[in-house]
Amino acid sequence: MSALRLRLYVAGDTTRSHLAIANLRLLCQELRVQEPDCEVVDVLQDPDAAERARILTTPTLVREAPTPPRRVTGDLSDHAAVLHGLSLPLDPTFPRSAV
């Protein structure tokens, strides 16, 4: 598998954004990949990034690499669904959510 690059788009300092960020951190820690590249983009601070990526809702997590890109929306609390949606392998010992 080539390097894993994930980008999470959130909108401001909200409870939903904080939950998605916490779940992304947990996902990045638990993935069995050497140092995944995980980035958070606040679309209120960088609306051009959201437009370039065609982000219509937040939170949205985009797997940019390996290609082809995949995306999931929501607070990322159902880790199994997130991994499935991003076409990443599911570890049976993986925790279901950060909260």
Image (cartoon, rainbow, N blue to C red):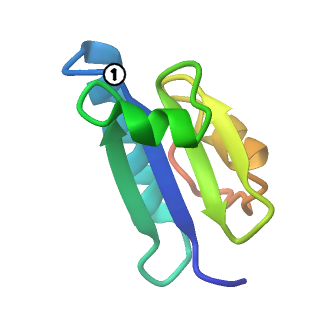
Q: Amino acid at mark 1?
A: Ala
In the figure, 56 relative to 96: above or below? Answer: above
Residue at figure coordinates x 32%, y 24% from the top left: 17
Residue at figure coordinates x 73%, y 55% from the top left: 69
Number of marks in picture? 1
Q: Tell me the element at label 1.
A: loop
Q: Position of residue 96 (x, y in %)?
A: 54, 38
In the figure, 4 relative to 43: above or below? Answer: below
Q: Report the side of 25 relative to 97 (left or right).
A: left
Which residue is denoted by mark 1 in the rendering? 11
Using the rendered image of the protein, determine whether residue 38 is visible from the camera's viewpoint: yes
Using the rendered image of the protein, determine whether residue 99 is visible from the camera's viewpoint: no
Quarter holding residue 89: bottom right
Residue at figure coordinates x 65%, y 40% from the top left: 82
In the figure, 75 relative to 6: above or below? Answer: above
Q: Kindly give the residue lying farthest to the left in the view shown.
A: 13
Q: Quadrant of the N terminus?
A: bottom right
Q: Quadrant of the C terminus?
A: top left
Camera-nearest residue between 8 and 86: 8
Residue at figure coordinates x 77%, y 46% from the top left: 84
Camera-nearest residue between 49 and 76: 49
Camera-nearest residue between 68 and 82: 68
